Structures are given as C-alpha cells and as structure tokens.
Amino acid sequence: MRYHKRFRGELAAQVSWLRKHRSPCDIRRLRVATASFSKRIAANPGIGYEVERQGVASYRVFHVSAGLPYLVWYVYGVMDLRGPVDLLMFLHVSQDRERFDAHWFD
C-alpha cells in the first residue's frame, strides 16, 4: 500500500475538520474504517468501481464504509494483483464535484 501525498493531505484535512466540528468518536470511526478499507483493498484491489483504465493501470473509486461519507480513489496494476495499490485521493462525498483525471498522478 502506497499513499500519495494528495491522499495524505486530504485525509489529514478531514481529520482536522472532524476535530473541530465532531466528537472524538467520529475520528475513531474514520480511522477504523480507513484501516479496514486498506486491508480489504490490499486483499482484493478490484472491489472499487473502475473510473479509468490506462493500459494495465486500473483507476478506481470506493466508498470507505456504509456509514461514513468518504470516497477513496486508488490505482493498481490488473496484471499484478499482489503488486502495490496506490491510494490517490480521499474526499467527502460532497467534495466529489471535479472529474477525476489520472494524469494528475503521473
């Protein structure tokens, strides 16, 4: 599992927002959900919805948890299911207004 700097920054921004506006319980829920997602995606990278394909690179989006409003964009190589999964973006569903462009991560 590899974390793109954009993913890390967006996740940190969400945690910061939760600290200011929600209870510590919500931060724990987010941490548990992202850890669970990371395990699931490492075991089965094809579970997300494919938004773009470039050669063997499959760019996907996945809803982190049924009870949380967060989406993760990631990429993996379809020919190497044991290869790295790169987590690219982490956004609240209300932020999902811009079209994803795989070229942002070249």
Image: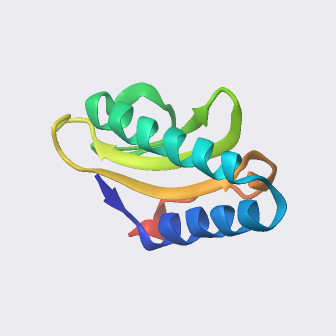
| Image location of residue 104, percent across then percent down | 50, 69
- Nearer to me, 54 or 11: 11
| Image location of residue 31, percent across then percent down | 52, 48
| Image location of residue 87, percent across then percent down | 42, 54
In this image, 70 relative to 34: left or right? right
Residue at the image point whose x is 65% and y is 26% from the top: 66
| Image location of residue 88, percent across then percent down | 46, 59
Residue that sits furthest to the front in the current view:
24
Quarter holding residue 78: top left
Figure check: 8 above or below 101: below
In this image, 21 relative to 52: left or right? right
Quarter holding residue 16: bottom right
Q: Tell me, yes or no, if residue 100 can be seen here.
A: no
Residue at the image point whose x is 43% and y is 35% from the top: 36
Residue at the image point whose x is 80% and y is 55% from the top: 22
Residue at the image point whose x is 38% and y is 69% from the top: 106
In this image, 48 relative to 14: left or right? left
- Nearer to me, 23 or 43: 23
